[in-house]
Image (spheres, rainbow, N blue to C red):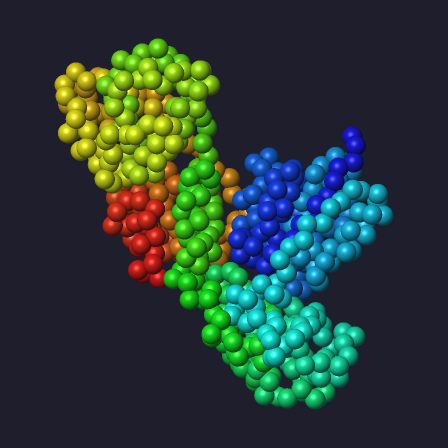
């Protein structure tokens, strides 16, 4: 087998919105990925389903894998012919030891590329309202590693008198030493400074003080690694420039539990509102649209085509296109369970005439009752796992109902259980997401989170497990977001 290739990928400081287009593109090519703690788990959403994932740890003083082991693994995976993604927080070459990995690959004559990442000394301070430079106040910035500061070869006299912004990475354990060294070498003890913990994520916290007091104040407030320590007059802008921490959902890590192809709308809206989003795709979709073939020749006979999900729409129309079926043959009215399903039908060039006001089958049936009559033929392409309510209710009205299982929902995968640890709020959008999440992470773990249910059907499933929950007033993505904003 020929040699593979390695991408050393900078994933930015934590906010998945700071991933570059190039890093996403490269991640999709990988069939093996090795990632660090500081890269975050959100980056895993951009991998292919068949990608093998290896966690390398890199926690302070407790490395899951040593650097030598990581170097050897990279080389070995590439020699096996794999496309390997080595995901690193920030930028691979800014105190990320990417250079050591590149040297090992070069020594082994293995092809590699480096994908630069947005580096945390700039991005984290930006999210904390602190510019690293500002006209007439700080005309330069200087970045140091703060780990084991007492052993570093830093010219403390030069650092104390350089006049620009001083930034120390990985510095929480050495902050006291750094402060004392700078004061001893001439930097005013009242110089403004800040510590920013877990910057650009839902756990971001910031302490503002002076050089003489910052260490004790940070300890008293319970800060811990990872932290960035910044010293200089630019810290005074932290309130005026504080845009990120003013967003309505700042500080909230919200877990979306629905299938990957249905998560994007909610995810994007939550990110815009300042939330950190953890996606756990508790549902996988297995399309079985070949079942449509036994109905395809009589689709023109139905008075109503009823869709109860976005997946139902996609599986139906994709199969018709695959079969070269002319949609103009369908003469019946189209019905949709809610706005998301309505939008998906409209993308196919069809305007549904019947739309449920709420995202539940009962609401859809109430709307259908204004149209149907005894003897009407109704076709429902739906999930094998759906409730039988709609079919039974229509038959009780005298309709002739055919349902076709065009897809089924399966329990999704959880690449890394650590992704759920920092979650504050879990959003459930169907009974299936409830059951599957309990399978994936366990009932006690789910019970420890704040829970939002999209509607009463999902709520009833939560009640089976004695889980306390809140419910959105209208059963849509916007209803859920409204609930989150009001309560947060």
Residue 296, located in which quarter of the rendered image? Answer: top left
Q: Residue at x 45, y 54 (%)?
A: 271
Q: Residue at x 44, y 49 (%)?
A: 268
Q: Residue furthest front?
A: 135
The image shows residue 193, relative to residue 105, as above or below, that is below
The image shows residue 248, relative to residue 73, as above or below, that is below
In this rendering, position of residue 200 left or right of residue 121: left
The image shows residue 324, relative to residue 234, as above or below, that is above
Residue 219, located in which quarter of the rendered image? Answer: bottom right
Query: What quarter of the picture does the C terminus occupy?
Result: bottom left
Image coords of residue 416 (percent x, y): 55, 47
Q: Residue at x 71, y 84 (%)?
A: 161
Image coords of residue 274 (percent x, y): 44, 59
Image coords of residue 186 (percent x, y): 70, 89
Q: Residue at x 56, y 36 (%)?
A: 49
Query: What quarter of the picture does the N terminus occupy?
Result: top right
């Amino acid at each position: 087998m020929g040699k593979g290739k390695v991408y050393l990928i900078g994933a930015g400081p934590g906010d998945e919105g700071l991933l570059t287009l190039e890093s996403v593109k490269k991640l999709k090519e990988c069939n093996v990925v090795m990632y660090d703690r500081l890269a975050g788990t959100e980056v895993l959403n951009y991998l292919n389903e068949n990608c093998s994932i290896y966690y390398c740890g890199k926690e302070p003083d407790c490395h899951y894998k040593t650097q030598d082991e990581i170097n050897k693994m990279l080389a070995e995976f590439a020699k096996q012919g794999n496309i390997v993604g080595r995901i690193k927080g920030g930028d691979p070459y800014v105190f990320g030891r990417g250079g050591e990995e590149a040297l090992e690959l070069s020594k082994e004559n293995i092809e590699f590329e480096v994908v630069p990442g947005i580096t945390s000394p700039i991005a984290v301070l930006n999210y904390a309202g602190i510019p690293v430079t500002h006209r007439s106040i700080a005309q330069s910035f200087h970045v140091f590693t703060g780990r084991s500061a007492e052993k570093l070869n830093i010219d403390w006299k030069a650092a104390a008198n350089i006049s620009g912004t001083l930034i120390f990475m990985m510095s929480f354990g050495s902050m006291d030493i750094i402060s004392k060294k700078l004061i001893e070498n001439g930097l005013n003890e009242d110089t403004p400074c800040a510590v920013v913990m877990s910057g650009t994520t839902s756990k971001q916290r910031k302490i503002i003080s002076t050089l003489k007091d910052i260490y004790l104040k940070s300890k008293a407030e319970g800060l811990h690694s990872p932290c960035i320590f910044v010293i200089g007059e630019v810290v005074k802008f932290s309130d005026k420039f504080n845009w990120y921490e003013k967003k309505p959902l700042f500080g909230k890590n919200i877990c979306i539990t629905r299938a990957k192809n249905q998560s994007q709308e909610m995810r994007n809206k939550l990110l815009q509102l300042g939330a950190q989003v953890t996606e756990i795709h508790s549902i996988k979709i297995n399309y079985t649209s070949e079942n449509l073939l036994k109905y395809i020749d009589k689709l023109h006979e139905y008075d109503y085509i009823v869709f109860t999900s976005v997946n139902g729409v996609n599986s139906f129309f994709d199969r018709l296109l695959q079969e070269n079926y002319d949609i103009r043959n369908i003469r019946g009215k189209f019905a949709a369970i809610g706005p998301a399903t309505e939008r998906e039908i409209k993308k196919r060039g069809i305007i549904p005439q019947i739309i449920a006001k709420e995202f539940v089958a009962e609401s859809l049936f109430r709307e259908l009752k204004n149209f149907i009559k005894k003897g009407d033929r109704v076709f429902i392409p739906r999930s094998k796992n759906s409730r039988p309510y709609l079919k039974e209710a229509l038959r009780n009205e005298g309709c002739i109902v055919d349902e076709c299982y065009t897809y089924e929902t399966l329990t999704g995968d959880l690449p890394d259980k650590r992704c759920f640890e920092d979650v504050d709020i879990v959003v459930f959008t169907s009974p299936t997401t409830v059951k599957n999440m309990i399978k994936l992470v366990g009932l006690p773990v789910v019970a420890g989170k704040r829970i939002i249910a999209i509607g009463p059907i999902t709520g009833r499933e939560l009640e089976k497990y004695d889980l306390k929950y809140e419910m959105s007033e209208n059963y849509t993505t916007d209803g859920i977001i409204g609930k989150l904003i009001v309560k947060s």
